Amino acid sequence: MLETIVTLGPWIWLILAAILLALEMLAPGIFLMWFGLAALVTGVAALRYDIAWQWQLIWFCGLSLVTVILVKQYLRKNPVETDAPLLNKRAVQLVGQTLTLVDPIENGRGSVRAGDTIWRVEGPALPKGTTVKVVGADGSMLRVEPADAES
């Protein structure tokens, strides 16, 4: 394997860049793109200058690290806006909904059914069948209070 890499020389980086960029298009997530970019720059530098394969590997690792860190910092300051900000926050999507307890709340814990999922809840002691309103979420735990408490 190492012999093949050494034989292909700089072209291995351009092949790797093409594979990574193609994978990025197939499975988008703007992650593989930065490794592909690092491989592309490494390949172009290796074609232009006579660089030992060990240094090419170090160059690729360094460029990968730098691009990932820079993009992470950029995205923290400029988050990507979406039309569905709660898409992967299922518990938060339930805040404000009225649900029925499937298990009583005893010792501060019980459960409700929302759609086809049973959710653990915490709140005041209430019997099974009580209608509750979701007032918050902490991870996958829902905080509830009796639905008639605010009426």
Image (spheres, rainbow, N blue to C red):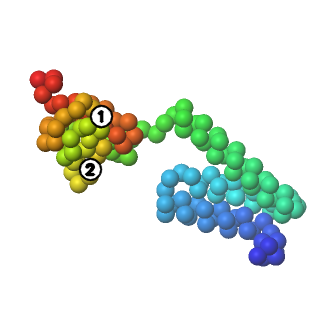
Q: Position of residue 84 (x, y in %)?
A: 34, 42
Q: Which residue is mark 2?
A: 118
| 151 up-or-down from 28: above or below | above
Image point (64%, 46%), residue name: 68
The crowding category of the residue bearing disc 2, from other C-alpha atoms within 10 Å (few below 14, some 14 to 19, many at least 20), is few
Residue drawn 49% across the image and 36% down it: 79
The local secondary structure at tag 2 comes to strand
Residue 48 visible to an observer of this rendering: no
Viewport quadrant of the N terminus: bottom right
The spot of residue 74 in percent (x, y) is: 58, 36
The circle drawn on residue 116 is: none
Q: SS of the residue at dot 1?
A: loop
Indicate the amino acid at tag 2.
Ile
- The residue at 34%/40% (across/down) is 141
Outermost residue toward the top? 150
Residue depicted at 65% across the width and 42% down the height: 69
Q: Relative to residue 64, is residue 80 drawn left or right? A: left
